[in-house]
Image: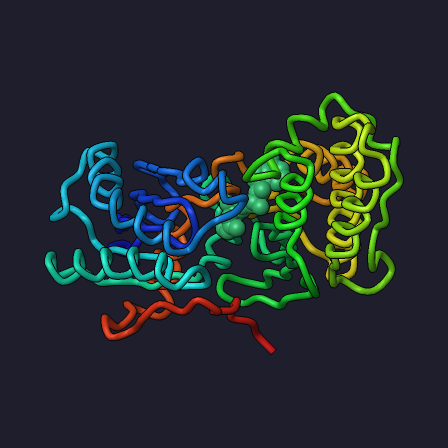
């Protein structure tokens, strides 16, 4: 597999509100990574508007891909393969990236690889730490998903738990929206929480003793009720307390899972993994438990195309190219074993 090792793959990501392209060589060497965020264009609606997202992807995708190639110092003929997120995500948004990737594959006679966005978040850590040893347990927490995954080997996953209602990122976003902090809410709460007291308001930690599943909708309601009843409460205190409840729940379950499956490492991924308190807590708790923890750089936690190109390298290696007749899969799930 000497030839495969050095493959240069162009990755494309358009599943939600980031238009991204990146070139990754050999599965882990990032030659370039460009992310054009639409967040500002959705902010006044308090969340992502699917139709606007698709149209904005169409507007910028050619330029984002061109920038990724220039940054990598390459042109299309020097690429070995092209990959795009084909699910899960917003249907119209996914189709933009998938169609662009297929067009490039056809025009340049290179393989196309359709990538699972959730699997890509699992792999983001490998871009910084290619020698991470498996099995490991990954907390994947984003705007649409919250799950604890036992990564037994490359391509072999068991989902130990997932949210039964809202995702952790969704909880951050909805609480922030209610408190008038705009979209996306996670970064805003993260910033304000720095000046707040996390013990000032005791919010519930739902399902703490019930396996590895999560539930965040009750917490969201508790926060909204609290704000209605105490409109003059200090905002940083509120943010720090909500954040503490979310982080507590995520980290307690993550560490419990790591101990139970005897994981060699714990890793976090997805946009919520950019959260300052979560990052610190995971490192502290893992050190206390004597388990290695890996917390990827923030840009690798939020949506990007380098993680898409990285997974594509592994998938091409194990499964070969994806048919150009395949489509976009808005409800795609993580492929699991057993
Ligand atoms: O992975 P991601 O970029 O997109 C999805 O695949 O959903 O995650 C976006 C989510 C949003 O809910 C956003 O509020 C949250 O990640 N997020 C954060 C932080 N940065 C992004 N949540 C808490 N603290 C942050 N610093
Ligand atoms: Zn994501």
Q: Quadrant of residue 85?
A: bottom left
Residue lying at 42% horizontally and 47% vertically, measured from the top left: 17
Q: Nearer the viewer, residue 212 or 131?
A: 212
Q: Residue sitting at 67 percent across and 41 percent down?
A: 178
Compared across the picture, whether 34 is left or right of 161 comes to: left
Give the quadrant of the C terminus.
Answer: bottom right
20 and 56: which one is in front?
Answer: 56
Left or right, 41 with respect to 287, comes to: left
In the picture, the quarter occupied by the N terminus is: bottom left
Of all residues, the one furthest to the bottom in this rendering is 338
Residue found 80% across the figure and 28% down from its top: 237
- Residue 220 position within the rendered picture, expressed as x and y whole percent measured from the top left: 74, 50
- Pinpoint residue 38: horizontal percent, then vertical percent: 40, 40
- Figure quadrant of residue 153: bottom right
The answer to whether residue 295 is left or right of residue 56 is right
In the rendering, at what x and y percent does residue 290 appear?
77, 42
């Amino acid at each position: 597999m000497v030839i495969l090792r050095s493959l240069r793959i162009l990755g494309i990501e358009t599943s939600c509100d980031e238009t991204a392209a990146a070139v990754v060589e050999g599965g882990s060497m990032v030659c370039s990574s460009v992310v054009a965020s639409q967040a500002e264009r959705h902010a006044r609606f308090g969340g992502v508007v699917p139709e606007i997202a698709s149209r904005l992807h169409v507007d910028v995708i050619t330029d984002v891909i061109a920038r990724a190639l220039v940054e990598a110092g390459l042109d299309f003929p020097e690429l070995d393969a092209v990959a795009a997120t084909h699910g899960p995500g917003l249907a119209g948004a996914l189709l933009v990236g998938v169609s662009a990737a297929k067009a490039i594959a056809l025009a340049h006679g290179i393989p196309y690889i359709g990538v699972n966005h959730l699997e890509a978040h699992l792999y983001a850590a490998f871009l910084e730490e290619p020698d991470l040893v498996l099995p490991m347990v990954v907390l994947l927490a984003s705007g649409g998903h919250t799950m604890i995954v036992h990564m037994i080997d490359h391509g072999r996953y068991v989902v130990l738990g997932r949210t039964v209602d809202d995702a952790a990122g969704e909880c951050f976003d909805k609480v922030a929206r209610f408190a008038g902090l705009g979209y996306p809410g996670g970064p805003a709460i993260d910033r304000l929480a720095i000046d707040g007291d996390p013990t000032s308001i005791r919010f519930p930690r739902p399902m703490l003793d019930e396996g590895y599943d999560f539930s965040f909708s009750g917490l969201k309601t508790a926060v909204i009720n609290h704000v209605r009843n105490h409109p003059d409460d200090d905002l940083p205190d509120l943010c720090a307390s909500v954040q503490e409840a979310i982080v507590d729940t995520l980290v307690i379950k993550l560490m419990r899972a790591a101990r139970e499956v005897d994981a060699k490492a714990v890793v976090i991924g997805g946009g919520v993994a950019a959260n300052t308190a979560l990052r610190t807590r995971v490192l502290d708790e893992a050190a206390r438990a004597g388990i290695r923890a890996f917390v990827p750089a923030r840009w690798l936690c939020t949506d990007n195309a380098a993680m898409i190109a990285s997974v594509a390298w592994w998938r091409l290696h194990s499964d070969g190219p994806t048919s150009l007749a395949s489509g976009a899969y808005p409800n795609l799930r993580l492929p699991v074993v057993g």
